Image: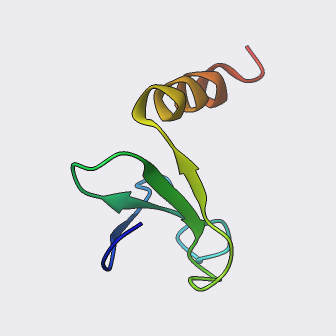
Amino acid sequence: MSGPLAWRKASRSNEEGLECVELSVGTADPTYLRDSKDPEGPRLALPRPALASLIHSIKGYGH
């Protein structure tokens, strides 16, 4: 990770701010995910194909 990352809150995050996920915004791989309540805390780094797979799995959870 080089330089500062720009972050975007997930559109489906809880409006009360209780369940917020943010993604790094940019063209470089990997994409980073973090908990917006703990911006200096741990980050998950995923290559774009792995992130797409994770999102697909989450959307299909419980079906």
| Residue beneath the point at 73% across and 13% down | 63
| Residue beneath the point at 52% across and 70% down | 15
| Residue beneath the point at 60% across and 31% down | 54
Give whichever of 34, 16 is nearer the camera: 34
Asked whether, in this view, residue 14 is left or right of residue 18, the answer is left
Quadrant for the N terminus in the image: bottom left
Q: Is residue 23 visible?
A: yes
Residue 31 % position (x, y): 42, 50
Q: Would you place residue 63 above or below residue 35 in this image?
A: above
| Residue beneath the point at 78% across and 21% down | 62
Give whichever of 26, 36 is nearer the camera: 26
| Colour option used | rainbow
Q: Residue furthest right?
A: 62
Q: Which residue lies furthest to the left in this view?
A: 27
Q: Would you place residue 60 above or below residue 51 in this image?
A: above
Give whichever of 60, 1 is nearer the camera: 1
Q: Residue furthest front?
A: 2
Q: Would you place residue 30 above or below residue 15 in this image?
A: above
Residue 46 % position (x, y): 53, 43
Residue 34 % position (x, y): 58, 66
Which of the 4 image quadrants contains residue 7?
bottom left
Q: Would you place residue 56 above or below residue 34 in this image?
A: above
Residue 43 % position (x, y): 61, 65
Q: Can residue 13 be seen in this view?
A: no
Total marks placed? 0
Which of the 4 image quadrants contains residue 23?
bottom left
